[in-house]
Image: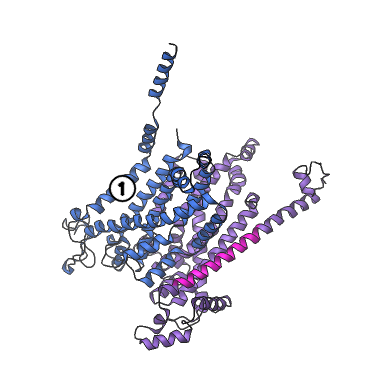
Amino acid sequence: MLVRGEIGPVNGALQPVSRHPVALALAFAQRYSCAMLTYAAKRLGLALLVALAVSVIAFTLLHVSSDVAAAIAGEAATAADIEFIRKAYGFDRPLIVQYFDWLGRTLTGDLGQSLYYKKDVADIVLSKLPVTLILGAISLAFAVLLSIPLGVLAAVYPNTWIDRLALFLAVIGQALPSFWFALVLIMLFSLTLRWLPVSGSDSWAHFVMPAIALGYYAAPAFMRLTRAGMMDVLSADFVRTARAKGLSPTSVVFKHALRNAIIPVMALAAVQLGFMLGGSIVIETVFALDGLGYLAWQSIRHNDFPVTQAIVLLLSVVYIGLTLLADLLNGWLDPRIRVQ
Amino acid sequence: MATVPLTEIGALDIALTPGPGALLRRRVFGHAGLMVGLAILAAMFFLAFAAPLLAPHDPYDQDLARRLIPPIWHERGTWIHPFGTDGLGRDYLSRLIYGSQISLLIGFAVMAISGVIGLLLGISAGYFGGKVDMAVTFLVTTRLSMPVVLVALAVVALLGGSLTVVILVLGLLKWDRFAVVIRGATMQVRALDYVAAAEAAGASNLRILFAEILPNIMNHLIVVATLEMASAILLEAALSFLGLGVQPPLPSWGLMIAEAKSYMFFSFWLIAIPGVALSLLVLAINLVGDGIRDVTAPENRA
């Protein structure tokens, strides 16, 4: 009620408003955390529904497009063998029954057995996850550290050679195929200069080239968004005020402008990390980096579909979680988004 | 009588202001990126269509006695094979020229399939709103949360790699950006007066969608189409590079790079040449897309 009075007269009557700062802050928190909670609950519900839809698609894709029993039986199997496996694994039951059975087991962490490694899928997948997460984190850091300074420079000096150079790098960056760029890096840094190892995942040096190859592809998007956001903010009134107060240009650009322009970039970072985990399959295969992406490629080559299915599901769930995080971050930092 | 000089002044005024066509031409020809992109793209089309006339050799002709001949800028290069030969002794220039057909075919076919799906979803979500919009947004979110490369690889592996399978799989996967952009553009156009006027005149939904809204979101559609075409070409190259896309002996540029990997140490041109061709094509398409967006953006209209 306090805040309603603050915003304006309700029911035509001016309500008495406590001007005490603590009371105001409390009322403010109540009002906005409530909106934030509703917003968060809605987003969470949507994320769960999407995850469910993804699980249906991942399940159906596999069971409709291939004969799973024949794949398990192997190439030398007879028709009777395949029939036996179909009964033993329960593939003769209706698809919907199989789906709920599979979903139930997946939710309790039982992802089945790998056909190729003859081990628990959950164990294999979890053992490879750290490498991919480290690669994603380093790539993201590389992309952000490269693109945000460039984007800020391009926005502070629009239509100069710096701006043109940044745009040129972005246009070129988006055109290079990531696997080819990775090979060029190998030829340059491993074969010619002999600075970095070609493949493997034993030391930090093994992550340098994969991170560059994966990160540079995300950099143009960050750069464009930083530049556009900074251009908007730099022409805003509060920045003009800050300048008029006589603050130093550095303080205006970094303390006042970048802080506001960075919000959408942070949200994009969460989404881009999801894309990077998905794109890591190409890069990890080129460098034989022993993570989830390389495992996915091997499982596809070996027809090891329980592993493939688990990785598709895991990467989708991680992506859903990251977009949820981005939405909540945006909603928390920018109250206007919550009411839409 | 007093109206005569007025019309004359008016006519003079019209003669001095360039018409909309002239303005558009001035913007198009004044845009360096767009012109460079169009020039490269035109050259690629020429290569693809005139491949049988331009290619000096049969791209599938193997000759193990003539394998790994270096390109012409190398001291041991010959004019018989200007870009050298690959590990099976096939003429690299001929394979490169025929490869442009595959990349362009993939680009256009995937763009067409995903464009139709995305356009139908996006335009109905933006126009009807409400439950339709919710359903489409849910579909898009679901599609976006599945990793494209991984799903495409898995499905191609299950169905067996071929040009048709790759086109269909990518076409059925890559409609998300179309749907998102078209939905937004349709929502903006839908709120304009001429749509309300068409509704008041009793036009059917279909008529409003295709006669009033579609022509006015065309520029957005074309820009997304170019971006998606570029991305489809890169994806096909990546799939073929990983061995789960177009199959040998077809001269897909991605496949050529994969085959060249074993000769990386001594014959690096085998990797460099198709990679540069791929980058040039994607760069050209992106430049054209960016150019069209700049030229048709309302804030740039004179």
* Image quadrant in which you'd find residue B264: bottom left
Closer to the camera in the image, A46 or A36: A46
Name the residue furthest top. Answer: B1
* Image quadrant in which you'd find residue A238: top right
Residue B221 picture location, percent across and down: 43, 48
Residue A287 picture location, percent across and down: 40, 68
Left or right position of A31 against B231: right
Left or right position of A30 against A149: right
Closer to the camera in the image, A80 or A295: A80
Left or right position of A74 against A44: left
Q: Residue at 18%, 53% (x, y): give it.
A: B53
Residue A200 seen by the camera: no
Magenta stretch encompasses residue A182: no
Check the rendered structure and report the hue given to chain B: blue
The magenta segment is: A39-61
Residue B155 picture location, percent across and down: 40, 69
Question: Crowding at label 1, few (<14), some or many (≥20) Cα neighbours within 10 Å?
Answer: some
Q: Residue at 82%, 47% (x, y): give it.
A: A20
Task: Count numbered badges in the picture.
Answer: 1
Q: Residue at 33%, 56% (x, y): give it.
A: B278
- Report the predominant secondary structure element of the magenta stretch: helix
The three-letter amino acid code for the residue at tag 1 is Ile
- Provide the residue designation for mark 1: B40
* Image quadrant in which you'd find residue B38: top left
The chain painted purple is A
Letter of the chain that mark 1 sits on in the rendering: B
Closer to the camera in the image, A159 or B46: B46
Q: Residue at 48%, 37% (x, y): give it.
A: B299
Residue B199 seen by the camera: yes
